[in-house]
Image (cartoon, rainbow, N blue to C red):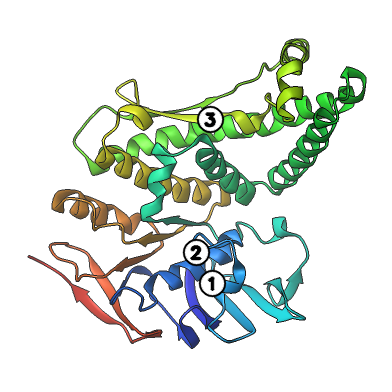
């Protein structure tokens, strides 16, 4: 998959901008605040339909404007054209969002997610390793939603079931009223948990491979999906009975996939507890590289990789190793406030200044 053209209209610092990058490695340089990360944000939105920078979508619009739009035009590996768009508009004080695919409106988010295999790494991805279990569950669930539309639908159904069950718990309702929701909870736990566990197994192998390319350390990493609930109905219902008093006191469900975790270990130790920040950042990067690779394998389509300020925290050797493995992706967008040094790779370099992306120059940076 290759991005052929990106059009930004009233998006962040861009009033009207068309960006036509090249295949391979594309470097966006410029001062902080110039608009480098906004380009990656726009591309990520076309893949995930949500921003990684804000939950308030009105912030995406250029200051003082009431509408904005992103358009992305892609070419698949088989030379098919793929066009996606997202637009926001303020009417009567409320913001609305519309998605489009091949020029037609998209009614369901599941029809939009994952149309373009794409993965984004940002400095905040450190939380994938040292953050709460919810960060790792979101990592798995967003990837699975891009791969399987049914997963997104079942997550929405799980949220509804938990909401209804929690309401009954807060009302002090007994086992009879909870019984149908318990059965639905068990069924959704099985399907959601099975997909998460299978994906964790696949990502574990990919992470080990990327880590070996980035370091000389043969000790890989292990990803293990940790369930908090039994996988057979009798044990599941018995555990719910044990938890009933605690659940009613708290007014919330304590047994569900939304309590599970993705355990990340290196040398049989938890990286969250015992890993250095350097190790954690390196493994977080490997998780995102693995995400891109897994999406490409599942879609049978090469992936686009987005790297926001990915090189600044790594030593020169790891920077060179990372740059050396990037050509295995069809297209890479890398932001950097500083010029790159000591890399054998050829980049198309774009200078970003105050919301304007200047024409590319081909640059091969050597020591």
Nearest to N terminus: mark 3 or mark 2: 2
Nearest to N terminus: mark 1 or mark 2: 2
Outermost residue toward the bottom?
A: 16
Residue positioned 17% across, 62% down in the render: 344
Q: Which mark is residue 1?
A: 2
Please determine whether, in this image, residue 139 is positioned above or below residue 361: above
Q: Which mark is residue 261?
A: 3
Q: Which mark is residue 74?
A: 1
Picture coordinates of residue 104, whole percent (x, y) = 74, 74
Give the foreground label among 1 and 3: 3
Q: Quadrant of the C terminus?
A: bottom left
Is mark 1 in CB contact (under 8 Å) with mark 3?
Answer: no
Residue positioned 61% across, 51% down in the render: 146
Numbered disc 3: secondary structure:
strand
Question: CA–CA distance between discs 1 and 3?
Answer: 35 Å
Give the foreground label among 3 and 2: 3
Question: CA–CA distance between discs 3 and 2?
Answer: 32 Å
Question: CA–CA distance between discs 1 and 2?
Answer: 7 Å
Q: Quadrant of residue 329?
A: bottom left
Picture coordinates of residue 339, whole percent (x, y) = 19, 71
Crowd tier of the residue under label 3, counting other residues whose Cα lies within 10 Å: few below 14, some 14–19, many 20 or above: some
Q: Nearer the viewer, residue 19 or 156?
A: 156
Numbered disc 1: secondary structure:
strand
Residue positioned 33% across, 87% down in the render: 359
Please determine whether, in this image, residue 93 is positioned above or below residue 236: below
Is mark 1 in CB contact (under 8 Å) with mark 2?
Answer: yes
Numbered disc 2: secondary structure:
loop
Asked if residue 28 lies left or right of residue 45, the reply is left
Picture coordinates of residue 326, whole percent (x, y) = 31, 56
Asked if residue 131 lies left or right of residue 170, the reply is left
């Amino acid at each position: 998959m290759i991005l052929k053209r990106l059009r930004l209209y009233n998006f962040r610092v861009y009033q009207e901008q068309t960006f036509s990058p090249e295949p391979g490695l594309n470097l966006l340089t410029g001062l902080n605040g110039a608009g480098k990360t906004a380009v990656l944000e726009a591309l990520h939105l076309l893949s995930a339909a949500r921003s990684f920078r804000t939950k308030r979508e009105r912030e995406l619009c250029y200051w003082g404007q009431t509408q904005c739009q992103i358009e992305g035009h892609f070419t698949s590996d088989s030379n098919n054209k793929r066009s996606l768009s997202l637009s926001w508009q303020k009417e009567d004080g409320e913001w609305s969002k519309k998605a489009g695919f091949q020029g037609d409106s998209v009614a369901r988010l599941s029809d939009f997610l994952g149309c373009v295999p794409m993965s984004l790494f940002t400095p905040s991805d450190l939380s994938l390793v040292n953050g709460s279990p919810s960060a790792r569950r979101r990592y798995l669930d967003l990837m699975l939603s891009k791969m399987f539309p049914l997963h997104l639908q079942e997550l929405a159904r799980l949220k509804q079931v938990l909401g209804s069950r929690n309401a009954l718990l807060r009302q002090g309702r007994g086992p009879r009223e909870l019984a149908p929701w318990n059965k639905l909870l068990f069924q959704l736990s099985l399907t959601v948990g099975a997909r998460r566990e299978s994906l964790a197994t696949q990502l574990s192998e990919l992470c080990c491979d990327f880590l070996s390319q980035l370091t000389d350390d043969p000790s890989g990493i292990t990803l293990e999906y940790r369930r908090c609930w039994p996988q057979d109905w009798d044990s599941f219902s018995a555990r719910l009975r044990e938890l009933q008093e605690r659940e009613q006191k708290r007014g919330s469900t304590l047994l569900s996939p939304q309590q599970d975790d993705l355990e990340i270990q290196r040398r049989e130790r938890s990286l969250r507890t015992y890993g250095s920040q350097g190790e954690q950042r390196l493994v977080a990067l490997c998780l995102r590289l693995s995400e891109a690779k897994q999406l490409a394998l599942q879609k049978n389509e090469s992936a686009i990789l987005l790297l926001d300020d990915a090189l600044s925290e790594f030593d020169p050797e790891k920077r060179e190793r990372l740059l050396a493995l990037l050509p295995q992706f069809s297209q890479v967008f890398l932001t950097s406030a500083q010029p790159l040094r000591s890399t054998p790779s050829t980049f198309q370099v774009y200078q970003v200044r105050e919301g304007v992306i200047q024409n590319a120059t081909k640059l091969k940076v050597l020591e």
